[in-house]
Image (spheres, helix red, strand yellow):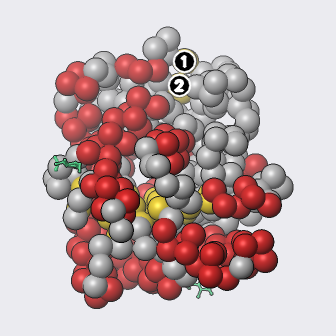
Amino acid sequence: MAPSSNFVHIMVVLSLVLILGVIVPKGEARRRAFFVFGDSLVDNGNNNYLLTTARADSPPYGIDYPTRKPTGQQLGTVSTLPYLSPELKGRKLLIGANFGSAGIGILNDTGVQFINVVKMHTQLDYFEEYQQRLTTLIGGSRTRRLVNKALFLMTVGGNDFVNNYYLVPSSSRSRQYPLPHYVKFLICEYRKHLQRLYDLGARRVLVTGTGPLGCAPAELATRSTNGECSMELQRGAALYNPQLEQMLQRLNRKLGSDIFIAANTAQMHKDFVTNPTAYGFVTSKVACCGQGPYNGIGVCTTLSNLCPNRDLYVFWDPFHPSEKANRLIVEQIMSGSTRYMKPMNLSTILLLDAST
Ligand SMILES: *[C@@H]1O[C@H](CO)[C@@H](O)[C@H](O)[C@H]1NC(C)=O
Ligand SMILES: *[C@@H]1O[C@H](CO)[C@@H](O)[C@H](O)[C@H]1NC(C)=O
């Protein structure tokens, strides 16, 4: 059961990036580049340029795109292109780039079962390469300024549980570390990536936590007997998310500025899961597209059960939030209280930055 559900996890669907990538540049008078790093929640097509099992360019992924065709490239020309796209050249480099790759994690050994994914370490290498390319186009100081003024989104971590620690019973990481130690290790490694991103010039970085990992339809189908969220995955998320926020706070203090902005996506999701009807959903347990219990088994294909109205479902497929859920999450990111956004929401950040 593990291989199929993990395959699903790295599939790409309409994501935060699509929505944020469109909202942010529009809402700003001044042009601002947008850079994205992370996993399947943000991958907008890089994996399609790789020989990998982790791709989403077959139907019905893409059912929500205006063209109703799975292009594997959700942002098209309106926003950031996948870094590996051959179209990303010349002036298009000024818009930013998406370095995300489905399947990857904080750790190098997360996602190794998928051949040819772009690890976080390599995503950051590519970002360096990007800056060199941009420098030849507009010069070093303008490149520096563009990067310093850009908005960054970093979404990673869930796969370090689902596709690593809990991938198989008694995985090598779970034999190496009890869960609390593993979480500390993850946070420590994550901090290094973020420090490197800062060193490479990032000054506003939105960092999302994990969702309620144990409540995804895939987990309900495979790990739960009574429809309750999987305890072990929930325990992972419950340990990880608060420590991530604390780490970001400490890093900001050390750097003397609010560089990293924590989005409490776990709380946002939890709201949906606890009370789906309050947000206009009929269920948070059953995926819109899939098969088996909770539509939580396997991948979403043309042969799957497909719900008639995707907006009524928290989950699009066994692992990924629906477009409606992502829109609600983006609303919270833009204007949520400090319960969701620390130290402040994104509209406040954009306002602050516009005045400097
Ligand atoms: C991950 O891999 C990269 C490149 O192979 C290496 O430089 C880095 O040190 C590795 N990170 C860890 C924590 O092992
Ligand atoms: C979010 O940002 C807006 C705009 O700056 C601000 O007015 C609002 O108070 C913030 N939301 C909350 C609930 O803190």
Q: Which residue is pictured at 47% across the width and 62% down the height?
A: 151
Q: Nearer the viewer, residue 8 or 339?
A: 339
Of the numbered discs 2 and 1, the one sitting upstream in the chain is 2
Where is residue 200 drawn, in percent x and y? 55, 81
Q: Nearer the viewer, residue 182 or 102?
A: 102
Where is residue 242 drawn, in percent x and y? 22, 65
Task: Specify the quadrant that holds the C terminus.
Answer: bottom left
- 224 w.r.t. 307: above or below: below
Q: Which residue is pictured at 53% across the width and 25% down the height?
A: 289
Q: Nearer the viewer, residue 320 or 37?
A: 37
How far is the residue under mark 2 from the one under mark 1? 5 Å
Give the side of residue 31 with respect to residue 129, left or right: left
Report which residue position mark 1 lands on.
Answer: 306
Task: Specify the quadrant that holds the N terminus.
Answer: top right
Report which residue position mark 2 lands on.
Answer: 289
Q: Secondary structure at mark 2?
A: strand
Where is residue 312 drawn, in percent x and y? 37, 19
Where is residue 20 drawn, in percent x and y? 47, 45
Q: Residues within 10 Å of mark 1 (few under 14, many from 20)?
A: some
